[in-house]
Image (cartoon, rainbow, N blue to C red):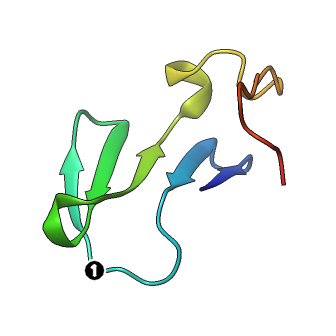
């Protein structure tokens, strides 16, 4: 899993699958979308205007539980 944040556009992307995958994009609303790959596998989640959707993330207030930061 890879979590990336683009501060210049306030966008967060959580990718669950490595490598290129052809995806269908399902929009939950104007700010959140899910990328679905073959066999309905969740490839990633994109959050636009992240500081609105996830207050505190931009300030690096992220707690990893039972995960190791790489």
6 vs 47: above or below: below
Which residue is drawn at the image coordinates 72% and 16% (left, top)? 56
Which residue is drawn at the image coordinates 57% and 32% (left, top)? 50
- Residue with the most extreme top position: 55
Q: Crowding near pointer 1: few (<14 within 10 Å), some, many (20+)?
A: few
Where is residue 28 drawn, in percent x and y?
22, 35
Q: In the image, is 39 to the left or to the right of 17?
A: left
62 vs 49: above or below: above
In the image, 35 versus 69, the foreground residue is: 69
Which residue is drawn at the image coordinates 71% and 30% (left, top)? 66
- Residue with the most extreme front position: 66
Residue 58 is drawn in which quadrant? Answer: top right
Residue highlighted by disc 1: 22
Where is residue 9 drawn, in percent x and y?
63, 49
25 vs 50: above or below: below
Which residue is drawn at the image coordinates 17% and 59% (left, top)? 40
Dot 1 falls on a residue whose secondary structure is loop
């Amino acid at each position: 899993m890879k979590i990336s944040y683009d501060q210049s556009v306030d966008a967060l992307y959580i990718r669950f699958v490595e490598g290129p995958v052809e995806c269908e994009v399902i929009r939950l609303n104007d700010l959140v979308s899910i990328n679905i790959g073959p066999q309905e596998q969740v490839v990633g989640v994109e959050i636009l205007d992240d500081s609105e959707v996830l207050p505190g993330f931009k300030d690096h207030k992220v707690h990893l539980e039972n995960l190791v930061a790489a």
